[in-house]
Amino acid sequence: MCEMKPMDYDTSYEGLIPEGNFRISPSMLDKFNSCKHEWYRSQVLGEKTFLGNTSTELGKCLHRVAEQYIKTNKVNDTEIMQYIDSIDNFDVDKDYIKIQYEPMKLALLAYLTSNPKPQYSEYTIAKELMKGIYVGGTVDAITADEIIDFKTTDTMSPMQKIPSYYKWQMLAYAWMLRELGMEKRFLKLIWITTSRVGRVSEKTGKQLKDSPSEIFEVVEEITPQDYEFIESYLRLIGESVLAGYKYPELVYIIFADYRLKGL
């Protein structure tokens, strides 16, 4: 339980998914629906279609804060700062991440210290869906009744309903946990907002209203219809992958990209 994941969260599924099986990633479920050809290129062909940006790297840092506090009751700021300095990506504003890190960390720690500590943090699980296909991913945190997902946002008033692109990911975790005998009743999305303080209007030169980093909870009960939907959706993905293996000449049709024809 106290073992730390690598800072880049490059998870190994050794011992969980036998070699030669395909893994459906919960974090990529929405991409299969919204951009099927990109999903195929990244998940099946292994192409690097997205290398991260400022938002995703800031999210990694805050996930690390939650993981460290839940597992050890302390946070290793030095490790996180070293990670930020090591990022080699022109799309990432490292100075912005450093500015936001401290106020967002303090808001998150205030929340974690005032609520019951989750039983697990960064909990990696996998479950066979069908022959040759597994579902596998890492849950941010788990309590007796809840699956918890931490998300950063620069919106001052985050959505009060879990958006589908996050809910499907969380439902995949719920499905795996239920199949593994650890059924949960609720999904809890925890928004961590960015800090907006000391800002000055470019038009008027006047100081703008401060909006410090805050925590917002969104909790939804998992219904039988949710389980029915997510299992059918996972099976659709699994059978699409297997169909592509069996009929490679039809991959461009299955995954909606004519450029895949003949690959």
Image (cartoon, rainbow, N blue to C red):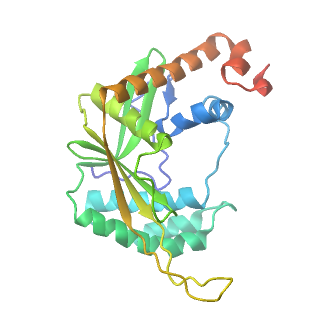
Please tell me whether residue 126 is drawn above or below residue 210 in the rendered image: above
Q: Residue at x 31, y 67 (%)?
A: 109
Point out the residue furthest to the top here. Answer: 246
Which quadrant would the C terminus be assigned to in this image? Answer: top right
- Indicate the position of residue 76 as horizontal and vertical percent values: 38, 68
- Indicate the position of residue 137 as horizontal and vertical percent values: 42, 38
Q: Residue at x 42, y 62 (%)?
A: 192
In the rendered image, is residue 75 in sight? no
Query: Within the image, what quadrant is residue 85 found in?
Result: bottom right
Query: Within the image, what quadrant is residue 187 found in?
Result: top left
In this view, the residue in front, 36 or 91, is: 36
In the rendered image, is residue 146 in sight? yes
In this view, the residue in front, 57 or 217, is: 217
Left or right for 74, reference 7:
left
Please tell me whether residue 133 is drawn above or below residue 123 in the rendered image: above
- Indicate the position of residue 205 as horizontal and vertical percent values: 64, 89
- Indicate the position of residue 72 as horizontal and vertical percent values: 27, 61
Left or right for 256, reference 239:
right
